[in-house]
Amino acid sequence: MKLTRMQLVFNAVFCLTLLGAALWALYAEYNRPWKQYQKTFNRMEYGYTAKLYQTMLLQKDGVSEKDLLTLKNKLSLIQNRGKKIKQLWLRDLGETDRCITCHQAVNKPGFENISHPFRTHSGDYLKHHPVERFGCVICHEGQGVALTVKAAHGYTKNWTKPILNGAYIQSSCSKCHFMDQGLPFTAELTGAPVFTKGRKIFMQNNCLGCHKLTGYKKPDRVAPSLTYTGDKINRDWLIKWLRNPKDYLPKTRMPRFDLSDKEIGYVADYLMSLDSVPGFRGHAGGFKNNSLVEEGENLFNTLGCPGCHKINGKGNDFGPGLSNIGGKVKSDWLYEFLKKPKSYDPKTIAPDFRMPEKEIPALAAYLMSLKKNEKPVPLTPSPDKRGRIFEGVEKGKKIVRDYGCTGCHEIETLPFQYNAPELDGIGDKRVDELVFNNLNDAEKTLTGWLEVKVREPGRFATDRIVTRMPDYNFNEEQTKALVVFLLSIKDKPVSLKYRKTLVDPDRAEMRGGKILEKYNCTGCHKISGKGVDIGPELTYEGKKSRPEWLFAFLKRPHKIRPEPILKAGMPDFNLSDEEVNTIIEYLSFISGESYPYDPEPKKEIYPEEIPSGEKLYQEVFACSGCHTVNGTGGEIGPDHTDIASRLKREWIEQWLKNPLAVKPGVRMPRFKFRDWEFEALTDYLMTLGQYRFVQVKGAD
């Protein structure tokens, strides 16, 4: 059959097209990017190794024939190395990983300053995470089976895990290294500082008060109780606070809710209706005396209140700022709260200073004098005597419930309920599941969506969509850290073979740190280089004090140092037995002392030895000139009445030998004791106390 001219032309074009396609396929296969990367790296590695080989040849000392032979063989291997796909099948992770096809230098030193994909992995992460066992995508995400840059990095449609860059890689750390909720905020995951900071922000700002998250529980209390707000707060202050808390307290963690003035009025109505503490009594006036104010200011500083509270820039931010406390609270409430904090709020962590009642008016007068001259908030209609507008109470109650206020604040008559989406799997969300509304300038990725949601939640509101998430006024650094933490919350857990707890919440250091954090112990004490000097340093308290004495002291604190040494007495935090034992174990741990403590055997002495030690104490070295025993003596140094029950003998011996070596700058002089004097004085001190740590021979 003879082909027509048209058919011949068609066949020719078809054959040429087929040939062109075949040639293009051969060229494309030969010129694949990963092959070019391997070719380039082989050349780079050969040059690097050859240079090293030549350097070693020129060295006369310290180079063995074996080392030279190893390098020579390596050069031969590199020269003959072909180009091939390198693949890791990580069965327990369910991942196929081909990243090292291009990133061949990842575990080879010497290429730290070369650009990707020829760079050595940064840091020492691969020392504990070898590529052969972990691959790359477990940490970096991306599409492990792909062989082009765009596909491998996950920048393709419908791929839910694009590669993580920079600090966002740290969101993968918790896949294997879970950070338990029981850890203190200061707990750190080594190598993941941004993730660590994000976790701290998440916990401190009580995101769990609105969002449920598997493996975590809502904290019992993170903010003051609102049960009896009407007894405590002035309505004018409350309205200004609700408009923008940071106007009053710039560092407060209380966020700003997007409420209208009318809604704020309703909330104020409801909160002002919460009053009448059972057994609560007001205090009749007497707080405007100038001499009382001055006395109260001295008392405020003497008691160590700046350890938790800041006034006009001075003090600590742990508790509420008090610069305008006089404009915030009612004087009746303040008097009763200072008298007995837990009578108003049984769950408060504010300690009881056990002040004589005659001192309370002075402290209250000083605090009530701290107020700014501000114009009262206009109210329409006018409130009643208790600061309430009755029509707004029920509306305010609904707003308080809908906006999740009980996630942070306790209100006895309003049970807690979650009011926001659960966070399980937030780090696995697909982009098509996210609602961007009118966010045209936001990056259309999960990371981009989270950044806007965390920093500017109000931008998601529309005419049809009401957003109740408040504005925490996070800066760029805080936003990034919190997003890194949120990205770490995945649905699919990794194999148990890969999980390893690096920061154990059951360690004494962590359990104790959690309690010290809760009660702000470093607000008054220095511990391991952190904190202030209002109270004694506690870094070596575990070596110094007997656990049984510490237990009794922490349960019922009392003054053991006179005012020239320490003006502030230890307040009563009403600690539980478990909390006290945990603190004692923590103090033992940080000072290197064993726990439980094994007390030293009682030293046996003869009855006649005691008077000689007492004579040394009272007369020769005149210890009683500074120290008190049973009410007699000086009040410059600590009371020695119960010293044997309080201090360990080994610590007393170290102190007597050289006080300045134990505590630099202390006013205690260094005495030059003869051996028998040192023993006799120490033995005498060990007889002073309810529990003597000497055994007198012949005594019952």
Image (cartoon, rainbow, N blue to C red):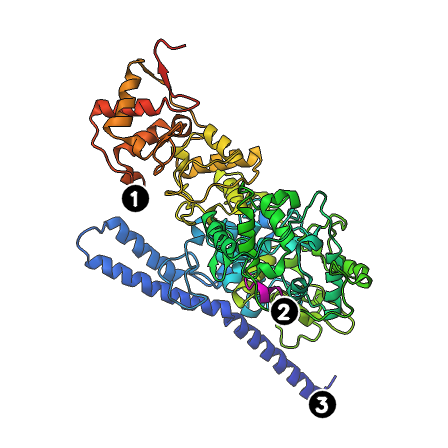
Viewer-nearest of discs 2 and 1: 1
Viewer-nearest of discs 1 and 3: 1
Q: Quadrant of residue 400?
A: bottom right
Image side of residue 516 versus residue 20, left or right: left
Indicate the secondary structure of the residue bearing disc 3.
helix
Question: Where is residue 644 drawn, in percent x and y?
Answer: 39, 26
Q: Quadrant of residue 210?
A: bottom right
| Amino acid type, residue under disc 2 in the picture | Glu
Query: Label 2 to label 3, Cα distance in Å?
Result: 67 Å
65 or 667: nearer the viewer: 667
Question: Where is residue 443 drawn, in percent x and y?
Answer: 61, 72
Labelled pair 2, 1 in contact (Cβ < 8 Å) = no
Which numbered dot is residue 6? 3
Q: Can residue 77 be seen in the rendering of this structure?
A: yes
Q: Residues within 10 Å of mark 3 (few under 14, many from 20)?
A: few
Q: Earlier in the sequence, mark 1 or mark 3?
A: 3
| Amino acid type, residue under disc 3 in the picture | Met
* Residue at the left extreme, as displayed: 60
Residue that label 1 marks: 664
Q: Quadrant of the C terminus?
A: top left
Q: Earlier in the sequence, mark 2 or mark 3?
A: 3
Image side of residue 294 versus residue 259, left or right: left
Q: Residues within 10 Å of mark 2 (few under 14, many from 20)?
A: some
Question: Which residues fall within the magenta stretch?
Answer: 244-251
| Amino acid type, residue under disc 1 in the picture | Pro
**In the image, residue 2 lies in the stretch drawn in magenta:** no
Question: Where is residue 539 drawn, in percent x and y?
Answer: 40, 41
